[in-house]
Amino acid sequence: MWINQMVLKYDELKARKIPIHRSTPGFRTQTPEARQFIASQPAYTTEINEWVETIPPANPRQHRKGIYSIDCETVWTTTGTQVGSITIIDWRNYEVLNVKVRPSSRVLNYNGMVSGLDGKQLFQAPGLWTQGQVQAFIVDKIKTTDIIVGMQLKMI
């Protein structure tokens, strides 16, 4: 199966309640109700997420479509969940980014059993990034034509 055959379409993203980028085919042609649904998603409305959209490549003809996998570990803070670490690898298994992210709010639970994170790693370790730095890196590196391979685990 080719990777493009596995890319979720607008209706599939909506059904799974996955944040939908404005450049997703079908986004602009949807009904006002659909646009309202998109705008009501947590990624667009939760202040702590500080949603930042990726941008198209400067020269689409010269941009080779990338395939990336992103894994985030989160901690629970006074303002909701925040990213505590992020790893991005490309389709060749090359590590694009692997950093710890300093939370901007007081941490209530490091979720250490799942995340493996603790206070020392997120507040005292050298080389900590902020959420804004991570977002700027992603916007610079990953474009709207790239593919993000994601995962979501749910307990049934």
Image: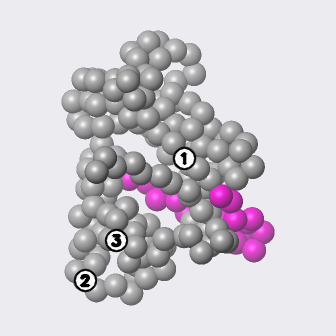
Q: Main secondary structure of the magenta part?
A: loop
SS state under label 1: strand
Residue type beneath disc 1:
Ile
Estimate the x, y position of residue 50 in percent, counting from the top left: 35, 48
Q: Residue at image x 56%, y 70%?
A: 6
Q: Residue at x 56, y 56 (%)?
A: 149
* Residue 130, image x, y percentages: 46, 32
The kind of residue on which mark 2 rests is Pro
Q: Which residues are magenta?
A: 51-67
Q: Residues within 10 Å of mark 1 (few under 14, many from 20)?
A: some
Residue for badge 1: 70
Q: Which quarter shows the N terminus? A: bottom right
The one nearer the camera, 11 or 142, is 11
Closer to the chain start, of discs 2 and 1, is 2
- CA distance separating discs 3 and 1: 20 Å
Residue at x-position 48% and y-position 32%: 85
Neighbor class of circle 2 (other Cα within 10 Å; few <14, some 14-19, many 20+) is: few
152 relative to 57, above or below: above
- Do tag 3 and tag 2 residues touch (Cβ < 8 Å)? no
Disc ID at residue 14: 3
Q: Residue at x 39, y 15 (%)?
A: 119
Answer above or below: position of 126 versus 22.
Answer: above
Q: Observer-nearest residue: 95 or 40?
A: 95
